[in-house]
Image (cartoon, coloured by chain):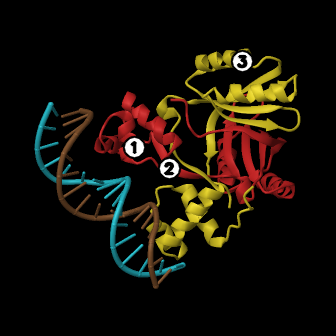
Chain colours: A red, B yellow, C cyan, D brown
Amino acid sequence: MATAPELDLTDREILRLIQRDATLSLAAIAAEVGLTPTPCWKRIRRMEKEGVIAGRVTLLDPARVGLPLSVFVALEIGDHSAGWIETFAQAVAAMPEVLECWRMGGDVDYLLRVAVEDMPAYDAFYRRLTAAVPGLRNVTSRFAMERVKGTTALPI
Amino acid sequence: MATAPELDLTDREILRLIQRDATLSLAAIAAEVGLTPTPCWKRIRRMEKEGVIAGRVTLLDPARVGLPLSVFVALEIGDHSAGWIETFAQAVAAMPEVLECWRMGGDVDYLLRVAVEDMPAYDAFYRRLTAAVPGLRNVTSRFAMERVKGTTALPI
DNA sequence: AGTGAAAGAATCACTTA
DNA sequence: TAAGTGATTCTTTCACT
């Protein structure tokens, strides 16, 4: 078990910068936070090892790659056993259209966000989902009209 | 208006790789797709210019930076005028806790995903939201227990 | 799409406060 | 324990083929 990471103000300032733009050079980061590149590099590497930094990814425009339709799917389930949940998690992991899957408290058991090409593609996904996951008590699909805001940058 | 980008199989293969890992060198990408670094670099730069590539970001672990609570907020509004919607979009843009905001079709008008420290922090956010956005007909908060899956990689 | 060169960046051993 | 220096290596970038 790793000890809880202590993040000082400089660590947080670095995170704030690289969260928004992973292409910033160490020299640019260093200039922003008032250090030289080497200590910045050491801090970043430390935060990667500690798991504070989960990764660096390239974000695409969904519409430009042929996936303009986003759907939120609320699931209510019948069987709440550990075995069922494990099976469900594996099914979801194997479906690349599912970008996010959250286990929820309250009336909804699971909430999915799905990216597909169009309505027929969503229908095909829906059929695969309900076939792969038996015992769904209720499935509610809500279709997104517009992404008003979308960021991966956490408020730190 | 830019012409619709044509993405060939190599473009898509490059996108598939860098979507998962933005730290891959051009040499590594080139080896994967069976080219040399220069044409890969030209393709990536072209897709950046075209807007297919939206950016490169660093992802953090929310719990490790003190934001372990994710809340989905469904909003029903009274006023559907263009002016209201513009005001709402600006309010949401100014609230860093709101990571995503979608305008929806159907029963729910807007769906937000919010990251906060704990329940008191969510309550404070809730008050700020309902104060900043007058005329909300209904606000439903659903609390996430567990992120079963979360990826930024689109199924291309 | 590839080659080869030049410029720029990351990485690290070592030094200093 | 944290930051800086300078050298090395790797990577990106680009003119030319």
Quadrant the C terminus of chain B occupies: bottom right
User: Left or right: where does residue B11 sit relative to residue A139?
Assistant: left
Q: Is residue A1 visible?
A: no
Label 3 sits on what residue type?
Ala
Q: Residues within 10 Å of mark 1 (few under 14, many from 20)?
A: some
Quarter of the image holding residue D15? bottom left
Task: Answer with mark 1 or mark 2, whichever residue precedes in sequence.
Answer: 1
Same chain for the residues at labels 3 and 1, yes or no? no
Residue receiving disc 3:
B132
Q: Which residue corresponds to the image point at 78% horizontal and 41% vertical from the top-left?
A: A146
Q: Check residue A112 in the rendering and tell me which mark sits there, or answer none.
A: none
Same chain for the residues at labels 1 and 2, yes or no? yes
Label 2 sits on what residue type?
Arg
Question: Chain for mark 3?
Answer: B
What's the CA distance linking mark 3 and mark 2?
Answer: 34 Å
Image: A153 above or below B36: above
Question: Chain for mark 1?
Answer: A
Image: D17 above or below A120: below
User: Left or right: where does residue A4 sit relative to residue B38?
Assistant: left
User: Left or right: where does residue B138 sit relative to residue A4?
Assistant: right
Nearest to viewer (mark 3 / mark 2): 3
Percent coordinates x, y for residue A32 in the rendering: 39, 36
Percent coordinates x, y for residue A97 in the rendering: 71, 54
Residue receiving disc 2:
A56
Percent coordinates x, y for residue B60 in the rendering: 50, 40
Same chain for the residues at labels 3 and 2, yes or no? no
Q: Is residue B39 visible?
A: yes
Question: Chain for mark 2?
Answer: A
Percent coordinates x, y for residue D12 in the rendering: 44, 60
Residue receiving disc 1:
A28
